[in-house]
Image (cartoon, rainbow, N blue to C red):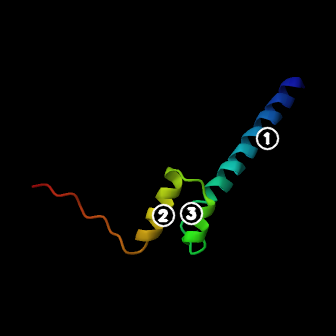
Amino acid sequence: MLNKSWVLIAAFVALVGCKADAEEGDKYTVSDEHCTPDYWKTLPDDKARESLVEKCMTRGSYKQSEPKTW
């Protein structure tokens, strides 16, 4: 019975951690709401924010060229 309790607790902790990661990732998805300078100012100054800004600036218009084999 005690082993089953530990398994349930471990599963609960894992699921809670997944939810927290999903919410954190939602802050950095490209959308009209997230692609505004006012929203960017609310985020911490880190690589994730820089990546979001880059994706917002190039969304829909940037197409990576195929590698050249000369």
Mark 1 and mark 2 in contact (Cβ < 8 Å)? no
Q: Which mark is residue 12?
A: 1
Establish if 48 lies above or below 4.
below
Exactly how many numbered labels are in the figure?
3
x then y, percent, for residue 10: 77, 34
Q: Nearer the viewer, residue 55 or 10?
A: 55
Disc 2 versus disc 1: nearer the observer: 2
| Mark 2 or 1, nearer chain start | 1
Q: Nearer the viewer, residue 66 or 5?
A: 66
* Tag 2: amino acid: Val
Mark 3 and mark 2 in contact (Cβ < 8 Å)? no
| Left or right: 54 as drawn, with respect to 31 | left
Residue that badge 2 annotates: 53
Disc 3 versus disc 1: nearer the observer: 3
Establish if 9 lies above or below 28.
above
Q: Which mark is residue 51?
A: none
Between the residue at mark 2 and the residue at mark 3, the CA separation in whole angstroms equals: 10 Å
Between the residue at mark 2 and the residue at mark 1, the CA separation in whole angstroms equals: 34 Å
Residue that badge 3 annotates: 29
| Mark 3 or 1, nearer chain start | 1
Between the residue at mark 3 and the residue at mark 1, the CA separation in whole angstroms equals: 26 Å
